[in-house]
Amino acid sequence: MSKENETTISTASRPETNGAGAPSGEETLTVTDNRTGRSYEVPIVDGTVRALDFRAIRVDEDDFGLMTYDPAFMNTAACRSSVTYLDGTNGVLEYRGYPIEQLAERSSYLEVAYLLVHGELPTASQLADWQHQITIHTFVHENIKEFLGGFRHDAHPMGMLLSATGALSTFYPEADDIDDPENRHIQTIRLISKMPTLAAFAYRHAQGQPYVYPDNDLAYSGNFLNMMYKMTELKYEPDPRLERALDVLFILHADHEQNCSTSAVRSVGSAKPDPYSAVAAGIAALYGPLHGGANEAVLRMLRRIKHRDNIPDFVNGVKEGKQRLMGFGHRVYKNYDPRARIIKKAAEDVFEVTGRNPLLDIALELESIALEDDYFIERKLYPNVDFYSGLIYEALGLPVAMFPVMFAIGRTSGWIAQWREMVEDPEQKISRPRQIYTGERARDYIPIDQR
Ligand code: CMC
């Protein structure tokens, strides 16, 4: 290849250093376009090449330039983020650099929410102020109750949560001023504080029970249990073990870098609507059975299996492609999901209070059979966070339809942290993928009587 044919693509608009602080431009990729014989040198920064750099690779002046094709974003980074670190090969999950195991053991959900949103663990006074702010914003406008009352008695609570979150934007029209940091902050507080209220109201609607107002004497998870389960008692007193287990579940679900719902929040948020609308998009994505609906699907699966004797037949069906083993497998984890390990332990703690869920035995046996089966070993399919979370939710007396709602409460802090990061990132623009057009071209319209 002659030197004239080598084109170095400008790095002028690129950051000067990579994440490790090494100067950029040190590492490059040379590609040769066999259509033209020309070679191109593309910078590698943070183990990544820029898709846009390939646009310079053209056969002639009229050529649009080379695009990259990556359905489902299997190998494309869409942002720089300092919120969550995930190493799926080694089963590592860290929020802002803190291992999930330590946070689940020692932190509270609200402290973790602060960490995700602000990037650092709070001091004692910062935490007290944050908790106070969240606590005094738990009420929703009375019209929200009427709005929820318009749903059918059997409406799925996730659909109700999705709509109610979107509806919040109409109660806070100033929320669309997303370029104002103070405004972003107050909407952050509102989203985190009101999500459990909306979730509990959706549940009580399905039960045909009156809504329970937030109790500001209680902590985040205790108040949620209050809004869910308070009946005629003057003061609801949550069992501290259940309250803690719930807090741990919220911590485990708080963020998971660029998953489907977070990408939805970022993608919709990139068009600059208010954050309620962006988070509603995240809830919509989380509704799906391959994402937040998986814990619901796990419970239905365990009930269908019904007895340990039926496990081998079920597993054979999975291997024949008739069904999936729900709660197994992950796009990123090719190892045991670290959250599943913590949740398995939390399940034992909850069962000490509520009594053992018989489905746990089916789940445990299913897991041990699958972990030794070549089909699952070869495909690196391990239990994910949802394999055991549904069992805990059921032990707490929740109907399966509430499971993704629980996921949404925890994930709200992650969505909003990622949304804020996106809004503040000067590199981000409106999200707009390309396509490879496969349809017809330039056809003449045919009148209906001639078709
Ligand atoms: N049961 C049986 N086979 C599976 C499963 C499963 N749960 N998951 C993946 N496979 C097989 C799949 O059939 C494929 O096999 P083959 O190569 O022979 O065609 C191979 O493993 C790769 O699967 P894939 O569908 O290409 O993997 P993916 O990265 O696109 O899907 C997933 C990831 C999570 C959607 C998928 O593993 C799945 O459907 N799992 C069950 C649903 C579930 O538990 N979802 C919760 C995810 S964790 C919570 C969250 O973050 O939302």
Image (tube, grey):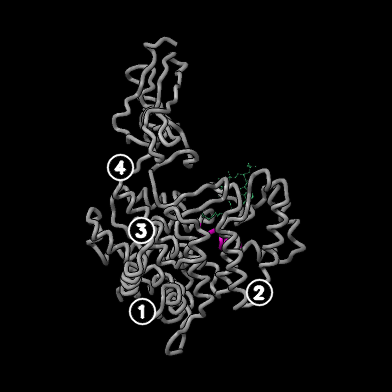
Residue 261 in the image: above or below residue 170: above
Name which residue type carries label 3. Val
CA–CA distance in space, label 4 to label 2: 50 Å
- Expressed as whole percent of the image width and height from the top left, the position of residue 106 reads 49, 66
Amino acid marked by disc 2:
Arg
Which of 163/440 is in front?
163
Residue bearing mark 1: 216
Question: What is the magenta range?
Answer: 292-298
Q: Mark 3 to mark 4: distance in Å?
A: 21 Å
Residue at the spot 73% in from the left edge and 49% down from the top edge = 373
Nearest to viewer (mark 1 / mark 3)? 3
| Distance between the alpha carbons at the discs numbered 2 and 3 | 36 Å
Give the residue pinned by disc 3. Answer: 117
Q: Secondary structure at mark 1?
A: loop
Mark identifier at residue 149: none
Q: Dot 1: few (<14), some (14–19), or many (≥20) neighbours within 10 Å? A: some
Q: Are marks 4 and 2 in contact (CB under 8 Å)?
A: no
